[in-house]
């Protein structure tokens, strides 16, 4: 690990220790907020491509995919925050 990677890893550990996983994750900050947006926007991109290839009838799946993207984004965000915290404790 070179010096830049070490500085970045130390900064991530400090931020992980200062944040509260429960409230920060649900409000939309930190790990969960970014991954929640990623989950939803991934599904929106898939629907846009499906509409371009197959027609507009596929767009009716968008509400279901948005809900599943929100759920997956929250779950992955909370798990990522827990994992980073535990890695920082081990280190």
Image (cartoon, grey):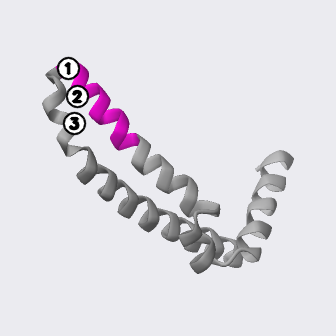
Q: Position of residue 5 (x, y in %)?
A: 77, 49
How far is disc 1 from disc 2 in space, using C-alphas? Answer: 5 Å
Q: Badges 1 and 2: C-beta atoms under 8 Å apart?
A: yes
Residue drawn at the location 51% of the way across and 54% of the way down: 35
Q: Earlier in the sequence, mark 3 or mark 1?
A: 1
Quarter of the view holding residue 52: top left
Helix, strand or loop for disc 1? helix
Q: Position of residue 65 (x, y in %)?
A: 27, 50
Q: Position of residue 8 (x, y in %)?
A: 79, 53
Which residue is under mark 1? 53
- The residue segment tinted magenta is 42-53
Residue drawn at the location 62% of the way across and 68% of the way down: 84
Q: Earlier in the sequence, mark 3 or mark 2?
A: 2
Q: Would residue 22 be seen by someone viewing this image from the given angle? A: yes
Q: In the rendered structure, does residue 57 fall within the stretch colored magenta?
A: no
Q: Badges 3 and 2: C-beta atoms under 8 Å apart?
A: no
Which residue is under mark 2? 50
Residue 82, above or below 1 = below
Which residue is under mark 3? 59
């Amino acid at each position: 690990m070179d010096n830049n990677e070490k500085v970045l890893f130390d900064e991530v550990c400090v931020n992980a220790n200062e944040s509260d996983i429960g409230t920060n994750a649900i409000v939309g900050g930190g790990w969960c907020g970014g991954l929640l947006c990623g989950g939803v926007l991934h599904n929106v991109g898939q629907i846009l491509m499906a509409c371009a290839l197959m027609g507009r009838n596929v767009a009716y799946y968008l509400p279901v995919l948005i809900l599943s993207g929100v759920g997956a984004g929250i779950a992955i965000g909370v798990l990522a925050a827990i994992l980073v915290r535990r890695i920082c404790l081990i280190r």
